Amino acid sequence: MSIDPRVALSSLTTALEEHLIAASNRRGDGDPSVEAAFFAVADAFEVYEDALYESYNEVTPLQVFDDEDEEDEVADVDEDEDLEIVEE
């Protein structure tokens, strides 16, 4: 079952608007409403991206990063890379 990209885009737009509202009403660091809105945007974006690809074989220039992506980036650093020692 494929989702109409227009419907998915509407859901993404709504999620972005709700994120803005949550962010503007933030009640301190780690506000659960902001965190929930953040993940709602990420989920809605992925649905939109999938619908766009299924319908038109097209993608956006955007990417959702998660904790696993950050860990992969750290793992990609060459640990055996030589370091240059600078003496003053």
Image: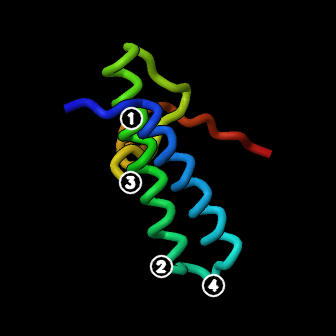
Which residue has dot 2 on it? Answer: 32
Q: Quadrant of residue 75?
A: top left
The residue at the point 36 percent across, 40 percent down is 47
Kind of residue sitting beneath label 2:
Pro
**First in sequence: mark 3 vs mark 1:** 3
Q: Position of residue 69 (x, y in %)?
A: 38, 44
**Dots 4, 1 in contact, CB < 8 A:** no
17 on left or right of 11: right
Residue 55 horizontal/vertical position (percent): 35, 19
**Mark 2 → mark 4, Cα distance in angstroms:** 10 Å
Three-letter code for the amino acid on which mark 1 is drawn: Asp
Which residue was labeled with disc 1? 76
Check the image and report above or below for 37 versus 30: above
- Compared with 43, 32 (above or below) is below
Residue 67 is labelled as 3
- Residue at position x 48%, y 36% in the image: 63
Q: Nearer the viewer, mark 2 or mark 1?
A: 2
Q: Residue furthest right?
A: 88
Q: Secondary structure at mark 1?
A: loop
Q: Position of residue 49 (x, y in %)?
A: 41, 32
Which color scheme did the rendering employ for the protein?
Answer: rainbow
Closer to the eye: label 4 or 1:
4
Chain-order first, disc 2 or disc 1: 2
Mark 4 — residue? 28
In the picture shown, does residue 87 fall above or below 84?
A: below
Residue at 38 percent across and 54 percent down: it is 67
